[in-house]
Image (cartoon, rainbow, N blue to C red):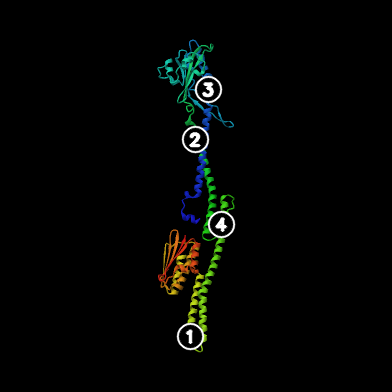
Amino acid sequence: MAWLADRKIIPVHQLRWKLTLSYTAVTVGVLLVIELIVIAGVFAYFISNARLSPEGVLQELNSGWVPLAQPYLSEDPPDIEGLQNFLQQFLGSQVDTDPLVITGSLELELKSYNFLSVIFVDAEGNPVGAIPHDILEGSDETSLFGLEAVAGLEGHLQLALEGERDSSQLYSVQEPDNRVVGAIPIYHENDASKVVGALVFTTKSIPWGLLPIKEIIRQFGYSFLIITLAVGLLGTAFGSLTARSLVKRLHNLSDSARAWSQGDFSISVDDAAEDELGLLAQDLNSMAGQLEDLLNKREEMSIIEERSRLARDLHDSVKQQAFAASAQLGAAIARLKNDPTSAETHVVEAERLVYEVRQELTDLIRELHPVALKDSSLAPAIREYAGDWAAQKDIEIDVQVKGERPLSVEIEQALFRIAQEALANIARHSEAKRVGICLYYQKSEVLLKIEDDGIGFEPLSANGGLGLRSMRERCELLGGNITIESAPGNGTCIQARCVI
């Protein structure tokens, strides 16, 4: 791909790497979204299965913690020291969830410690133990009044000490963090009507107070990071291979189109796939065939046009001059015996006419063989042809070229033919002494300007001429136009513009 190297495409700007990076980015992005959905799903599962409702908290405390303190507070007097020693073996409270089955025997279970703060009080409302153990340390408020001052506890402790059995009266949910606070009565082991103490509790905010978010994110983050890197590398490799195949097919299309632009229709796109690129290749091959047929027909039409022009030129010049030469020779033969001097005059005129016929034929032959374009571009060919033409016609000529650059073969051939036709008309009709040719290569068009200082003519009266019509047709076939400026006695200026 030498032409790609000439354009100096930076590797990261190449289509292959753009497609690879896009594929990798999409793959990693989708994986990250899936990972976030999985984490959110795990959070939602644990939140919904953590038994965080107030009723669930009361049930958990009634079945788990109240029976632990009941034997010590049922003694007379209550065994406070025994209760405190017993509570020392517990490091804190624990709330767990139902296990999440991943696959087979692989399960994921969430446990949260110290989500609950529990305080045991005796029948008079005096704190006698707590979990965690340090929640009463450094506090002077160890009476019933001090516990009632806990935010949200209000009268729940008093109702519990009075033996309230309606659980809805024993707790409340605090806004805005949804903490649950309350108290549960502890009854005598042998007398269910006698209250020997109460269990006061508070929870952290729900649901986030339960979840160790940092730990979950850290654990999931490590595993997902490894998975993301692995998938990213695999995605990059797969994307590169996929993009390589696609870009190779695009290069084949580009190479074929480049060859067609240079007139070589022998190359076709070799892509038998049935996808969009394959169908595009088939359409381009069909289009190339049609263009080749069109160019062949156009060449045939050009040949027919050249034949018609040559027939016209032969009829208008060579045939008429040959007929005049024949007449002069006939007159010379008739006067040869009686008036040799007059016969010689007719022979001399016939010789002049024959010389002009030879010159006309030489010009036509040169036009039929524009060999200058075979080995060079338009500007050098025009310079060479103009130099030869000026030497033969003894007419001064000046050629100027600005902004020279390569053009398509069709444009160069047409402009060269137009220059030939214009110079031929100047030699036949203008009686010019000086001719100027300007070839300007502009941004979107090329301009060929030919002017002379001859006798000029009336352009409107010459529109039907075959030579001028031929020049117009050549230019219009290429999307251009020809303008003619002339007046009797003021020379002629012909401008041919072709779109590049």
Horizontal and vertical percent position of residue 436: 41, 68
- Tell me which numbered mark, 1 or 2, is placed earlier along the sequence: 2
Q: Amino acid at mark 4?
A: Met
Which residue is found at the position 49% from the left and 54% from the top?
4
The residue that mark 4 highlights is 287
The residue that mark 1 highlights is 344
Mark 3 Cα-neighbour bin, 10 Å: few <14, some 14–19, many ≥20: few
Mark 2 Cα-neighbour bin, 10 Å: few <14, some 14–19, many ≥20: some
Mark 4 Cα-neighbour bin, 10 Å: few <14, some 14–19, many ≥20: few
Whether tag 1 and tag 2 are in contact, CB under 8 A, the answer is no
Front-most of 495 and 164? 495
Q: Residue furthest bottom?
A: 338
Q: From mark 2 to mark 3, how far is it between C-alphas?
A: 32 Å
Q: Nearer the viewer, mark 1 or mark 3?
A: 1
The residue that mark 3 highlights is 56
Q: From mark 1 to mark 2, how far is it between C-alphas?
A: 117 Å
Q: Secondary structure at mark 3?
A: helix
Q: Nearer the viewer, mark 2 or mark 4?
A: 4
Q: Is residue 286 visible?
A: yes
Q: In the rendering, which numbered label is found on residue 172?
A: none
Q: From mark 4 to mark 3, how far is it between C-alphas?
A: 78 Å
Q: Amino acid at mark 2?
A: Gly
Q: Amino acid at mark 3?
A: Gly
Q: Is residue 278 above or below residue 309?
A: above
Q: Amino acid at mark 1?
A: Glu
Q: In the rendering, which numbered label is found on residue 221?
A: 2
Which residue is found at the position 48% from the left and 81% from the top?
349
- Tell me which numbered mark, 4 or 3, is placed earlier along the sequence: 3
Q: Residue furthest top?
A: 76
Front-most of 390 and 406? 390
Front-most of 311 and 162? 311
